[in-house]
Amino acid sequence: MSTQAVRLFRKLDGLFAVYKPQGVHWKLVRDTIESNLLKELNSCPPPPRLAVQFQLLSSGENSSSTDLTLSPSMVPSLADHPQVTGPQFRKVHVGIGHRLDAFSSGVLVLGLGKTNGLLERLCKSHVTRDYTLEGEFGKATDNFCHTGRVVERTTYDHVTQDKLERVLAMIQGANQKALIMYSQVDLQTQEAYELALKGLLYPHGKSPPVLTGLRCIHFKPPHFTLEVQCVNETQKYLRKLIHEVGLELRTTAVCSGVRRARDGPFKVENALTRQQWTTDNITQAIAQFRSTTRKIRKSGIYRQTAAISNTSIQEHKIKGHDDAQNFSGGTMVDRVSPETRDEERT
């Protein structure tokens, strides 16, 4: 019969999300969760097995008798004691999805058990991720972050919210054109119309970061906040986006905060905070996303279909590639894509 620890261990198989604080490396988050799980699993050891032991009883008044009296009894066997065998569970592998660097905070998707292989599929499935970016006008640094070395200071009195929104609209328009190009869908077909109507156009294969949504939600100079929806991004790309916005407004800007609010189906309201990184909360979160995990297993149908249906329209794709390059020639897509193709590993 399975012990309580074994039954609990079997429940640790699935995907869940945690909230990574700013200033904490993702490796520390993973190691902390692994330590918490191992500590709780090993805190309830299995009951010891019982062994039969015969005890020799004294003969009492009949001391001259040569008969031996043996009495059987059940005593616990110390061979299975944790101090003899060591802890029952020594390793719990926690997988990491799309990483967050130490400067960033927000939703971090993790996996346990057999679902660790789904994390790579989730990262490559071109799911949309939502971010909240905080920026500050008036200075530029060597790493686009407010903690970096200041290399330039500028004025920003001429910047208004209307000018900022026009710049954001220009950047988003260029990225929408790039999204159509990288989706490799024939724009003359009914399929392309239905996919665009449902918002299901995604890059096919490898592509540079693409913004699918960009708007200003707070403006109080020198501080401002942007809400971004993107695909294939890195945190370095998002910090450089703030820098590029400042240049388009003929000033400078640095990023003071990057917060991921959603990673595909995993939202910030479902993420476990530091106080909730316990076995009970993690098993509940895994059960909550059980149906989501099954959907991720079946994902990829559209991308395979699109790849097959577009093998006969190479001429159209080449023409769309040239048109998109002419349209976005000086925009955010072309200027930052060579530096953001590799995933940031800091």
Image: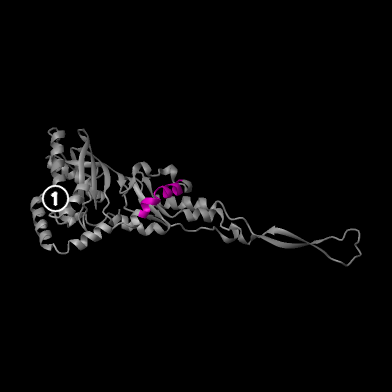
Q: Is residue 343 visible?
A: yes
Mark 1: secondary structure: helix
Colour mapping: one colour
- 318 horizontally vs 48: left or right: left
- 44 horizontally vs 157: left or right: right
**Who's the residue at 90% across and 62% down the image?**
63
Question: Which residue of the protein is positioned furthest toward the front in this rendering?
Answer: 190
Q: Report x, y in % for residue 4.
A: 55, 53
- Magenta segment main secondary structure: helix
- 74 horizontally vs 15: left or right: right
Q: Report x, y in % for residue 176.
A: 16, 48
Quadrant of the image containing the N terminus: bottom right
The residue identified by callout 1 is 177
Q: Which residues are magenta?
A: 281-294
**Who's the residue at 21% across and 61% down the image?**
307
Is 5 placed above or below 155 here? below
Q: Is residue 28 visible?
A: no
- The amino acid type of the residue labelled 1 equals Lys
Which of 141 and 297 lies nearest the eye of the viewer? 297
Q: Quadrant of residue 79?
A: bottom right
Q: Report x, y in % for residue 318.
A: 11, 60
Q: Is residue 204 magenta?
A: no
Q: How many labels were placed on the picture?
A: 1
Q: Quadrant of residue 150?
A: top left
- 293 horizontally vs 42: left or right: left
Which of 125 and 315 lies nearest the eye of the viewer? 315
Q: Residues within 10 Å of mark 1 (few under 14, many from 20)?
A: some
**Who's the residue at 31% across and 55% down the image?**
122
Which of 129 and 148 lies nearest the eye of the viewer? 129
Q: Report x, y in % for residue 254.
A: 21, 42
Q: Quadrant of residue 57?
A: bottom right
Question: Which residue of the protein is positioned furthest toward the bottom in this rendering?
Answer: 66
